[in-house]
Every structure is written in structure tokens, then in C-alpha cells.
Image (cartoon, rainbow, N blue to C red):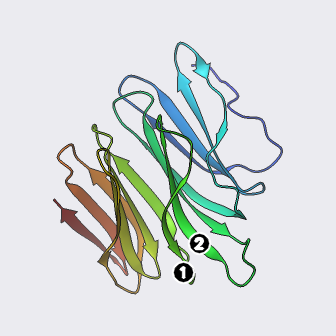
Amino acid sequence: DSLSLVEETYVDEIDIQLVMNPSGYATVVWEDDYYGKILSKRYSASLGWGTTYNMAKNLLGDVYSPHVAATNRWPSFMAVWTQSDISNLDYNEYGVWATRYPASFSAELIKVNYNAFPKSPRVAVNSSDDAVVVWKENGQIMYNWYLADSGWKGTYVIIAPTDARNPQVVVDSSRNAMFVWEEGDNVFASRFE
């Protein structure tokens, strides 16, 4: 029932994402495209809102579409986003980036493509801190696993249609993942064990 100011800025903040675990701890992630930042801030009932962190790599490019997922263990979360790197003026390099907390706020590049623009990355995290990231790229639905005991596993293509969009993912404690996406006027799903 109370109103609190989370962040005061002088630019438009967009794509705000919010997660809360069952114990009531929250994480908010948002895009500050003017300065090329993906920002996050955590909340606990006892301490209120914490410090704002910039999770994006400083690649001189644009940031897009942040998404965040949390586990039951506070303050564990993983955030993903798309970011370009215009430091090489011959082309725009776009990648899907991820960071996880409490491991670090160091961003990791999990997929890069010099001729494509990955869109709408989404992440799901299970109670063991395993994660699955899914995104759309050139009409394909692609994903990458992060296993808490061994790290990133590599990029895989679920399906390569021409009109796939808006992918979503969930994952359970046994590392079973379910993906859904739109294609044309239909909704498709795929399950991986």
C-alpha cells in the first residue's frame, strides 16, 4: 500500500521487467537505451530497494528487450537482453547477453551473429539455478542451456520457420523445458527433456 521511487532518471526507461520469489524478494530490470544500459535493482521488505547496477557490456551499441527470472533462493536471478556492438564500423554485431546473480554482474555473450538481429530473449530458471534462454533470430526459434554445474551448453535451433515470433520458455527442477511461440495464426510448443 505504499508508493516508492525506484529510480530517478532523465531519459525514458522502457521494457521494465519484474520478478518476485515466494519469499517476497523482488528484482526489477529495465532498459536505458539512451545510455546503452540494462539496469537492475533488488528489493527486500527489511531493506527496501538496493543499489542500481548496470549489467550491460559497454559495447557502444544499443540494448533491447531485457527479461529476468528468479529462483526460490534469494537473491538468485538471471537476466538476458539483446545488445549491438558498433565498435567495428564494417558491420553491426548483435548478440544475446546474460548475467546471473549472485555469481556476478559480469555479462556473458551466449550467442552472436554478424548478419542477424536476435529478438525477444526470454529466460526461465529452475530451483537448482539451471536456466534456459530462448529467442527469435531470422525466423528461427533458438535456445541455449545454462547448467549450474557446468555452464553454457551452446546454441540450438528448435525449429526454422519463416514467421516464428514471441518465444516463451519454462523449465522444471528435472531440467525439462517447454517452449512455445507464434507462427502465422498458430501457437506451437516443443518439449525437451
Dot 2: element: strand
Q: CA distance from mark 1 to mark 2?
A: 7 Å
Q: Is residue 136 above or below residue 175?
A: below
Sooner in the amino-acid sequence: mark 1 or mark 2: 2
Quarter in which the C terminus is drawn: bottom left
Marks 1,2: beta carbons within 8 A: yes
- Image coordinates of residue 46 in percent, x first then y, are 53, 12
User: Observer-nearest residue: 152 or 176?
Assistant: 152
**Residue found 29% across the figure and 45% down from its top:** 149
User: Observer-nearest residue: 100 or 13?
Assistant: 100
- Image coordinates of residue 10 in percent, x first then y, are 83, 44
Residue at label 1? 116
Residue type at mark 2: give it: Tyr
- Image coordinates of residue 131 in percent, x first then y, are 34, 50
Left of 58 or right of it: where is 77?
Answer: left
Residue at label 2? 94
State which quadrant residue 176 falls in: bottom left
Q: Is residue 97 above or below residue 74?
A: below
Residue type at mark 1: give it: Ala
Left of 3 or right of it: where is 185?
Answer: left
User: Observer-nearest residue: 82 or 169?
Assistant: 82
Quarter in which the N terminus is drawn: top right
**Residue found 64% across the figure and 55% down from its top:** 57
Dot 1: element: loop
- Image coordinates of residue 77 in percent, x first then y, are 44, 39
